[in-house]
Amino acid sequence: MPAFTKILIANRGEIACRLQRTAQALGYRTVAVYSVADAQALHVQIADEAVNIGAAPVQQSYLNIPAILEAARLTGADAIHPGYGFLSENPDFARACAQAGLVFIGPSAEAIELMGSKRLSKLAMLEAGVPCITGYQGSAQDDVTLQQEAQRIGFPLMIKASAGGGGRGMRLVHDSTQLQDQLRTARSEALNAFGSDELILEQALVDPRHVEIQLFGDSHGDLIYLGERDCSIQRRHQKVIEEAPCPVMTPTLRHAMGEAALKAGRAVNYVGAGTVEFLLDRNGRFYFLEMNTRLQVEHPVTELITGLDLVDWQLRIAAGEPLPLKQADVTLSGHAMEVRLYAEDPAQGFLPQTGDVLRWEPADGVRIDHGVVEGQRISPFYDPMLGKIIAHGATREEARRKLLRAVEDTVLLGMATNQRLLADLLKHPNFIGGAFSTGLIAEHFNEIAPPTLTAEHSALAAALFYQHSAATHRQDLSGWRNNASVAWTYRLAINDDVQVIAVSVLAANHLQANGIDIRHLSTDGRWATVVLNGIRRRVAYHLDDTQLWLPGVKVINRTQHIANRQAEPDGGSVKAPMDGAIVDVRVRVGDSVSKGQLLVVLEAMKMEHPLTAGIDGIVKGVQVVTGDQVRNRQVLLEIE
């Protein structure tokens, strides 16, 4: 009898879509689970069967173990793949699957439990002889102990959630005055994300590289590694660009890191896919960071340079088969790069964004793993990563060039994203030359300007609004106005920066806007084809009366807007920067506050966002309490 025939994917989004692609290709039936917020999601649509497991908050759906097991029982699934994230590193979930008679496609609960704790895993790695960073990984978690240990380690240091990853519960502390606030935030984030507020402390290395080894073990006692990945391009301790191989890797260093990873795996009799992460300093010394007992988000770059399907390997190992290759048979070919496409605003400190996906057209010629459906709502309940764009080339430069074109050609309109930043990173001289560390973004992109329009795109925006008005009035572009020689004046706002643009009608389908010649403008509601100053271009767009989305920017037509000169500045109002949940309110009505003081903590997309006072004053109104769900731009409290 086969080990299993129907696999329930206990995850969502691009993760669930990726897993289903391989499972279905191998002949397995798949079951999707979804929250109320994900009822129309792509992973639900492509599954053979799907079951609603609860409300939008993760605790009521994707972290709800009884609901997931009931979905498996209801559909007759005999295996569960946890994906990466959510319950993938939860030993209780692995045990619950076994108790329910389900094959858990992952390592043993014991391995997950040990390696899922940064504290316990570090102790195990020290015993196994794996190089580790100086730090504190003790069981005492009181503030006094942590303060004493922080002084012993020295600053700067890292606070890390023992149970977590992905940047949650992780804080860089530069000096002792920051320690208490950062401990509180790290504990709160860790508890909300992983159900445990246990922390560890580690010495912070200055500008290291983040290099990880892909590990695989089978139930027959064999363990191998499939090369390495460089994941150094990060923001807020979360990866943005990954590549394989590492640009500074040597055969000697690869062998040493691979052997260290094998030591880590053997220490827990590892079975399945795992990733051992290291920090690599400028002198070629490396240190154990953590082991993720799951497939990683960035696994596609390893797949592209090895020619292997790692999900295929996971399923075969879970079915009891031996590893398909021996270590000597592993070969690496060419170079692969991946970028993570996030719904976030880099110009506002990478603030996660919510909204509707108005346009979605992935670029051709590369691999794109995603779970995006045009028209879907990006909610505040889940991680802001929408998908990944991955390219392979014979050389690193070829892979970079292909990836850059694909990033620029991918169409995603409807919310702020990191798409422009990704392109800028791929074009940065340090990245091109491979001379970078985890500090690249902080050092070279610490002040990211909000998006702007070029003169030509401003002219195109005005022409599109003009064309839309003409169509609305059922006239043609030759001039539905009596006096065609008089220019139309548009007031267009981009991030509250208002541009005044004059559009003149010169002839049929021939306009001029602020000196830019515009000819042969044709649109189909999705693409505008136009000749701008003699150059023919094709530009993606979405226009909705007074709002126009062009790649990377939203333009608002304020031509008819009447300014209220009596309006007072709202510096005393604290508004939600996005949809989310209130996790802490620090003040009450009547309290005196000073500019910069922490007032409210908002949780959205698995991260906490502190909101501070914009002015000195007295709190005159508090409109929220802990636990409230709030909308973007909602007034939370007022100061006078």
Image: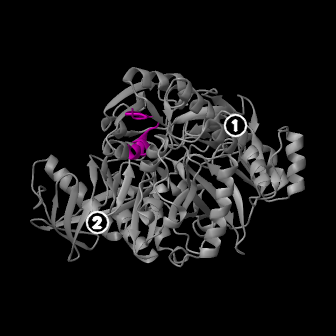
> For the residue labelled by badge 2, is the local secondary structure a helix, a strand or a loop?
helix
Q: Which residues are magenta?
A: 1-19
The image shows residue 378 at horizontal and vertical percentages of 42, 41
Residue type (three-letter) at the residue carrying disc 1: Ser
Relative to 389, say whether 576 is above or below: above
Asked whether 416 or 196 is in front, the reply is 196
The image shows residue 119 at horizontal and vertical percentages of 76, 45
Q: Quadrant of residue 629?
A: top right
Question: Which residue is drawn at the image coordinates 15% and 52% (left, top)?
Answer: 470
Residue 179 is at least partly visible in this image: yes
Residue 640 is at least partly visible in this image: no
Relative to 388, say whether 109 is above or below: above
- The image quadrant where one finds the N terminus is top left
Q: Quadrant of residue 523?
A: bottom left
The image shows residue 86 at horizontal and vertical percentages of 54, 38
Structural crowding at the residue carrying mark 1, measured as other residues with C-alpha within 10 Å and reported as few (<14), some (14–19) or many (≥20) = many
Left or right side of 434 for 398: left
Q: Are marks 2 and 1 in contact (CB under 8 Å)?
A: no
Question: Which residue is drawn at the image coordinates 36% and 39% (left, top)?
Answer: 43
Q: Quadrant of residue 249?
A: bottom right
Residue type (three-letter) at the residue carrying disc 2: Ala
- The image quadrant where one finds the C terminus is top right
> For the residue labelled by badge 1, is the local secondary structure a helix, a strand or a loop?
helix
Q: Which residue is mark 2?
A: 459
Left or right side of 582 for 4: left
Question: Which residue is drawn at the image coordinates 76% and 48% (left, top)?
Answer: 124
Tell me, what colour scheme is on the image? Answer: one colour
Q: Which mark is residue 188?
A: 1
Decide whether residue 8 is among the magenta residues: yes
Mark found first going from the N terminus, 2 or 1: 1
